Every structure is written in C-alpha cells, then in structure tokens.
C-alpha cells in the first residue's frame, strides 16, 4: 500500500469521525445514501452487543440495515474503520461527571464509567486501544475526565497518568467481571466445584501451598466463587484514590 493511499485512508477515517464538525458536503457523484453513517455505526454496535465482535462484518451490518453488502462501503471503507467509529460512538454516550460531587467521588467516577462501558459492551475488550484514532466522543470523554481532576493539585502529566491508571484498572477488572458472567451462564460456581473440586483436593499436595490453601479457602467461603470482581473493584478504586490524592503533595 502506498504512502499516498495510507494518507487518503487516514483522511477518510478522520473525516468520518469528525463528520458532525465538518461543513456539509455538496452533492457529489455516486449512489444516493439511504441511511446515515450514524445508523450504520448504531447497527454495528447493536450487532456486537448481541452476538459479539467476531460476528461484525460489512456483510452482517448491511443485512441488519437491509442493504446490499457492497453499498455499505459507501458509508465506511472497512471493518477496521467501522470499529473505530463504534468505539468513539460508545465513548460519546458517557454522561458528564457532575462538578458538584465531592472530589473523591469525581475521581472514582472516571473508573466507574470505564468499567460500566465495558460491562455494557464487552466487545470493547477485543478492540485494541493502542494508537486509537481520536474522534469527538473519545476527546470529549477525556476532556470531562480531566475536568474531574482539574484543580485538585495534580500536574498536567499527573492528571493524564491518573486517568490512564484508573482506566487500565477498570478495564482489567471489567474483563474479569465479563468472564465471570460468561462462566456463570455456562456453569455455576457450585457446579464447577462439584466437577473439579474433589479430584483437585485429592491430588493437590496442600503442604506445598499452605498460604494459597488457607487464603483460597477463606475466599471461597466468603464469596462462594473463585473471586469477587465487584468487591475487588471497590477495594482497588479506594487504594488508587488514596495514591492519586497523595500525589498532590509529590511531583
């Protein structure tokens, strides 16, 4: 692929992302579009929410909209571009973080929103966030996250790092919560333990793992499950907030 072609594709994607901020295009050549780009993105999100990201394709989204597959390319150039648009549209759904909330709750809201977003759209875990092309949804979310931290005494760099740490923790925890929900749909924790527990207890030399056996037993008795993603999230957010707020006195 030529450098010029790469540039053209990048320009096309950016224009799609920022389509609401650009002046309307004058009528041009090509077939008249029967739906909007927004409708295409919404259909793709609904399909991914229902059936998973692996089921999203140009053909499948076209079928959702009652269009011919080739006609969808007049809206988006590829599945990869569509995924970028989907991620940005989901980010645009974030509600503002109320400025009147206590400082600690404002910061915690950053992590809570990220976690809630992944739980509502688990397919986000399959889309790489690295070098994500920035659209208005993601930029507006970042602006709101920064506003939640503005004025608490962090440097600009520390504010960005705080958002990154909160986001990565919330995403990782949400991954566990999604896995737990999927696992429970296939097999309850009690059923799983009935299948594997007796034989594991028989063959595992407990004396080699005294701490793991003790702590694991306490966890199992407390949660009746291998782990507690919801409780771990609250525990982790509290500790992260302690560290972030301590950073105000450092550099």
Image (spheres, helix red, strand yellow):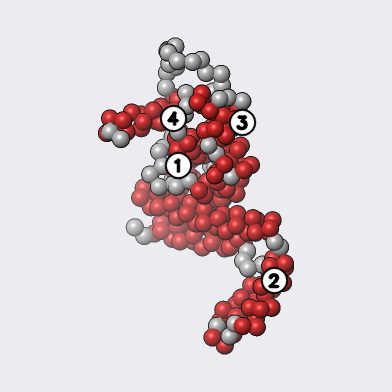
Quadrant of the image for the N terminus? top left
Label drawn at residue 142: 1
**Alpha-carbon distance for marks 2 and 1?**
46 Å
Q: Specify which label sits upstream in the sequence, 1 or 4.
A: 4
Q: CA distance from mark 3 to mark 2?
A: 41 Å
Disc 1 to disc 3: CB gap under 8 Å? no
Image quadrant in which you'd find residue 186: bottom right
- Residue 147 rendering spot, x and y as whole percentages: 46, 42
- Name the N-terminal-most of marks 4 and 3: 3
Q: Which residue is mark 3?
A: 64
The reply to whether dot 3 and dot 2 touch (C-beta < 8 Å) is no
Circle 2 — which element? helix
Q: How many other residues sit within 10 Å of disc 2, few (<14), some (14-19) or many (≥20)?
A: few
The residue at 45%/25% (across/down) is: 19
Pointer 3 or 2: first along the chain: 3
Residue 27 falls left or right of residue 115:
left
Q: Nearer the viewer, residue 237 or 123?
A: 123
* Image position, residue 195 (x, y; %): 69, 71
Across and down, in percent, residue 208 comes to 54, 86
Secondary-structure class at tag 1:
helix
Residue at the spot of label 2:
195
Q: Which residue is mark 4?
A: 77
Marks 2/4: CA distance? Answer: 48 Å
Residue 96 visible in image? no
Residue for point 63% across, 68% down: 226
């Amino acid at each position: 692929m030529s450098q010029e072609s790469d540039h053209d594709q990048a320009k096309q994607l950016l224009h799609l992302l920022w389509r609401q901020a650009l002046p309307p295009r004058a009528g041009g050549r090509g077939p008249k579009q029967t739906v909007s780009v927004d409708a295409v993105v919404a259909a793709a999100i609904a399909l991914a929410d229902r059936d998973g990201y692996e089921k999203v394709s140009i053909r499948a989204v076209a079928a959702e909209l009652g269009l011919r597959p080739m006609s969808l390319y007049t809206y988006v150039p590829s599945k990869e571009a569509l995924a970028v648009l989907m991620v940005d549209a989901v980010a645009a759904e974030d509600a503002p973080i109320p400025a009147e909330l206590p400082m600690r709750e404002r910061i915690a809201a950053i992590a809570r929103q990220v976690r809630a977003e992944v739980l509502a759209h688990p397919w986000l875990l399959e889309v790489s966030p690295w070098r994500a092309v920035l659209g208005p949804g993601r930029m507006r979310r970042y602006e709101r996250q920064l506003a939640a931290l503005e004025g608490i005494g962090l440097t600009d760099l520390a504010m960005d790092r705080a958002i990154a740490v909160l986001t990565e923790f919330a995403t990782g925890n949400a991954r566990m919560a999604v896995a737990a929900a999927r696992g429970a749909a296939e097999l309850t924790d009690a059923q799983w333990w009935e299948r594997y527990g007796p034989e594991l207890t028989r063959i595992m030399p407990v004396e080699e793992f005294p701490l793991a056996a003790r702590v694991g037993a306490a966890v199992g008795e407390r949660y009746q499950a291998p782990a507690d993603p919801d409780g771990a999230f609250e525990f982790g957010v509290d500790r992260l907030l302690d560290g972030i707020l301590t950073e105000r006195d450092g550099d």
